[in-house]
Image: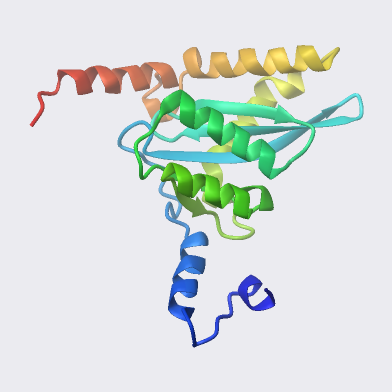
Amino acid sequence: AIMHENGWFSIRGGAKKLYEMSKQRKENILSQNFIATEPNQVWVSDVTYFSFKNVRYYICVVLDLYARKVVAYSISNNNSTRLTKSTLNKAYYARMPKEGLIFHSDRGSNYTSRTFIDFCNTLGIKRSLSRTGTPYDNSVMEAFFKTLKAEELYRHSYRSEREFREKVEKYIEFYNDKRPHKMNRNRTPNDSEKSFLTQLSKTPNK
């Protein structure tokens, strides 16, 4: 166990296979290239937290890189694999991406646990991981959380958990449907995605 945790492998008995598996688990596929050419090609995810009335709430978000659209989010009192897995599950069954989707996150245990890895493998999802201590490797999510906090969370004093949850839901709806994004040539995420799908429908099959 100690050898595997440190990336050490015996030269005997399947060492090459174990090495390749370890390398794949730690690969940073994106390498700060945050451009996708179509929806459901690359998703990024992260967890942030917000506290009020001495209670900490963790917000997990999955965002589609193509139009910078939030495709799923969840709120929990625990930052755990259960939170990240349930959010990815919600995104997957809402969007039904084809096999080969790239899912990028940091190396937190909530994204690198055996349960989460197995779940991604079951769905045919390729995992990409930021380098340790390199927030720029997931800067799109960092930027989204900064916007969420500046435009919603830090601007309101919530009276209850219910109000907090309702406001977050309304903000994400606003973000997707009403808020222009410079990466979308100042169109909203929903408009940008709809434009892609419209063009796709007009393209004759080869």
Does residue 21 appear anywhere in the picture?
yes
Q: Nearer the viewer, residue 67 or 18?
A: 18
Quarter the N terminus occupies: bottom right
State whether residue 105 appears in this view: no
Q: Would residue 41 appear left or right of 132 to someone viewing this image?
A: left
How far across and down, in percent of the image, does residue 164 sit? Answer: 76, 17
Q: Residue at x 81, y 17 (%)?
A: 161
Question: Residue 53 sits in which quadrant?
Answer: top right
Q: Quadrant of residue 66?
A: top left
Q: Quadrant of the C terminus?
A: top left
Q: Position of residue 158 (x, y in %)?
A: 82, 15
Which residue of the protein is positioned furthest toward the front in this rendering?
A: 13
Q: Residue furthest right?
A: 54
Count of marks, rendered view: 0
Instruction: Determine whether 34 is above or below 200 in the image.
Output: below
**Residue 37 at what x, y percent from top left?**
30, 37
Q: Nearer the viewer, residue 174 or 110?
A: 110
Quarter-wise, where is residue 143 in the image? top right
Could you tell me residue 135's position as x and y percent?
Answer: 60, 51
Colour pattern: rainbow
Location of residue 51 with respect to 27 vertically, above or below = above
- What residue is shown at x 60% (from left), y 39% (from top)? 85
